[in-house]
Image (cartoon, coloured by chain):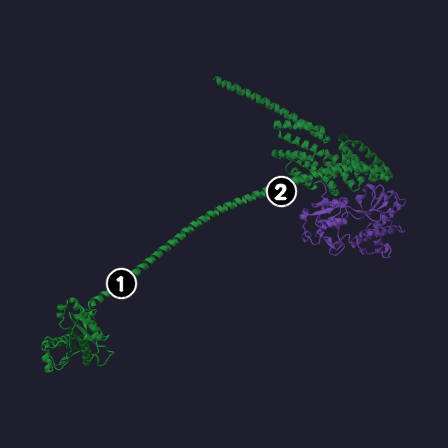
Chain colours: A purple, B green
Amino acid sequence: MSSENFSQRYTEFLNGRSPLDVKSFYPTTKGSHIEIIEMVLLQQALFLGGETREVVFNPKPSVNIIEFSDMISGESLVLARSVWHEDIINYRGSLYVSDPVVKFGQYEAGLYVTKRNVALQNLPQEQLEQLTVVANPRWRVDWRALNNTDINIVSFIGPWETMLNMVETEVVDAMLINFSVSQDLLLNFEGREYVPIQNIKMMLPDSRHFIVSKNHPQGEMIFAALNRGLKILRAQGVLDKALKQSGFISHLVDDWRYVNQQMLNPIQGAP
Amino acid sequence: MKGLSWLLAYWLLSFGTWASVSVESSSQREDLSKMLMHLTDSLKEDYDLNLLPQVRVLREQSKQLGAKNLQARSLLLEGLIRQHFGDYKHSLVLHNDALNIAKNLDMPALEVQIYLALAQLEMDLERFRYAQQLLDQAYHLITTKVLAEQAHALMGEYILWQGSLYLLKGSFRQALAMLSDANLIEYKMLSSKLALARAWAYLSIGEYQRAEGLISSDFVKLAELKRNLHLRVRYQLMSATASLQSGDFAMAINTAKHALNETFGTRFLTEQSMLQNILAGAYAQLGDFEQAHLYLKRFALSQQALNLQKRNNKLLQLEAQYSLAAQKQQLSVLEKDNALQAQQLVQHQQQIDNAHLAQQRGVLGLLLIALVVGFGYWRWQNKRYLITLKQQVTERTAELAERNKRLQALSFTDSLTGLNNRHYFFSVIDAQIKPDPSKNNEKQEMIFCLLDIDHFKKVNDTYGHAAGDIVLQTVADILKQCTRESDLVIRWGGEEFLIVMPNMTHNEAIEAVERVRRQVECFPFLVNEQPIQVTCSIGFAPYPLTNGANHTLSWEQVIELADNGLYMAKKEHRNAWVGLHSLNQPLNSSIKQLNEDYRSLINSGQVVASTSY
């Protein structure tokens, strides 16, 4: 967890408060906010679930031969952030998978284009086949979402910034990005501005969960506490509030149309 | 008759031959159909390369027999086998050939099978959008054209491949909806394949219990698994995955290893890589990192091989796209060319039409211009002619007038002296004597004066007529000089001149007459360079003149009186003049009498006159 300076920004966000006292989840630091919020939510859930001990975060490099190997081996107990379900299905034998933090169909993203490209911003859904989007095939959920539309995909494995630069330089038209927290959904990255194609949103077809090691001696207990706490947080509406306030779920796009609606609600039975 | 019987025999013979051929061909067809059935069944078990020679024999024979139906099916079979071994290019060609035949023969069921085969091919090439289009076409044909008894089986196939496409695209909920339990029950023939596909969908979303339930259910037929290696391997893959997800690592390893052994030396690279991945995952979670690492390496190698295959396929795809694009470009160039040519043709036609029209217009215009010009010319000529005519008329008129004038002048002029003649005098005298009302003064009276050259005959006789003429001309000149503008000088005849002097009193007349007499007398006449003496005698009388009885004399009478005076002057003197002043008493005697008695009348005082002598 050393990338993107999460630890430092986490401390900045708390600003001396206990994570259990956080009631407002509006972003106050620069950069991706959901990771910080998840750290807070995890602790609140554990606390509510009966685990009152203080949580200690151990930053670890996120790249390993087998993902989550620390968790699998039991060296780590809980992952500080949520993961896509499909990334851990083959490790379910070693990992406890919590109730979803982000439910299936809750995760929405926009197709961001450069702000100067006014024509693209108003591209009607029927003309999506003209659009070319850059995507990383390792981000399997994004990849699947895009593959179930008429959009043309340019595969790219590399830094996020380079992908954005591909949009900037018009190598591609757009990129799939979480809706921005700002009021006009504008994404400002290093002085360059990007906006989503209007009235179009994409559902990322998976759920996100916290994971707890099964091989850790306290795994079972902690997992039970976590799930209890998460149920309470969901019942209190804290989970949804946190996702909304952090900008993860944007009410601005409530009435926008999904381009991959069929992945959420397929026609049942024979065609 | 003989010829006719021969013909009959020949006809019978040929009919017999045809009949035997037809029987033979129908039995051959039957054989081929059986062969096709057998091959199709074998193919359902496995795509065996050893089937290819038979398939080709079938195709050749059916081609020779003209059995298009069988030919198309054999094409499809070969295409399917080739496709399975990665020869996408040729299988595409074969499928398309088969499709052409099927379309021509109107065999929708076969068409559906070909569309489904093509859809599989596109799925192998990861061209999901095209695969979806082909599946849509297949579905449309099944629901609209295919007969009911064939439609059911084809619909099952369609559901299987549509479900598979959803799985490949990662739309697992759609896959589950398509490969529903109801469909598994409905399409029993395909239930194993459908169930395995559905199980894969469950495993993709981590619902391993459901997957386990499915693969151990009756939907998956063990007999079928026994026959079909590919199906069996897939079954084991599902089982191993389910075991892995459930945390039964030993079972997962066991099943996966077994499956891997079965696939050893086979072409199921995808399944192999997945099994290796399962093994790596299972060993890692068991803490056996050595084994995990080993299988991870193998997995990486398989993945590499798969990627290579994919890359080749993509390359193929790109090439195909490129050649298609090139073709399209060529086509569009040709189309453009055609369009251009058509346009040019149209333009040419238009040009020709325009030229035609222009020509017509030109001709019309020329005609019009010619007409206008002609008309104008005609008018102009006409006008000119008229003008010329008018001019001529004017000229002629003027000429005529001039001639008339000249004629008149000639007729009024004495050619020798240039003086007016008697005609002239007669033509103007009436106007002359008419009293002018505007001039009411004393000098109303005028003088009629007659002059005669003395001894003129003698001049003519002595010097010749030419000399006489010179004398006459000279006298005339003297008269012109000695008279006023308003006076009339007339050559009265022979050597006699008449001078009419208006507005003149008797005394003034005396002066004038005297002047003339003296001029003539003094003028140095030269005849044949000899000076000669010429004199003249003059008589004059006033007008108006009344006799005693208030009777006004006419101008003729006045001239007669003047002539009387001349006569008297000649008779009594020559180179002299006699001028009548008035008549003192009533003159009863006639003019003739006056002439003779002029002297006596003067002397008696009845006539008042003056003389120069």
Type of amino acid under label 2: Gln
| Residue identifier under label 1 | B399
Q: Which SS class for mark 2?
A: helix
- Residue at numbered disc 2: B329
Please give the chain letter of the residue carrying mark 1. B
Query: How many tags in the picture?
Result: 2
Q: Dot 2, how many residues are within 10 Å of its Cα: few (below 14), some (14-19), or many (20+)?
A: few
Q: CA distance from mark 2 to mark 1?
A: 96 Å
Image location (x, y in percent) of residue A154: 72, 45
Q: Position of residue A200 (x, y in %)?
A: 71, 50
Secondary structure type for disc 1: helix
Q: Nearest the camera: B465 or A26?
A: B465
The percent position of residue B564, horizontal first and vertical second, equals 12, 76
Categorize mark 1 by other alpha carbons within 10 Å: few (<14), some (14-19), many (20+).
Answer: some
Name the residue furthest top: B2
Q: Residue at x 63, y 30 (%)?
A: B69
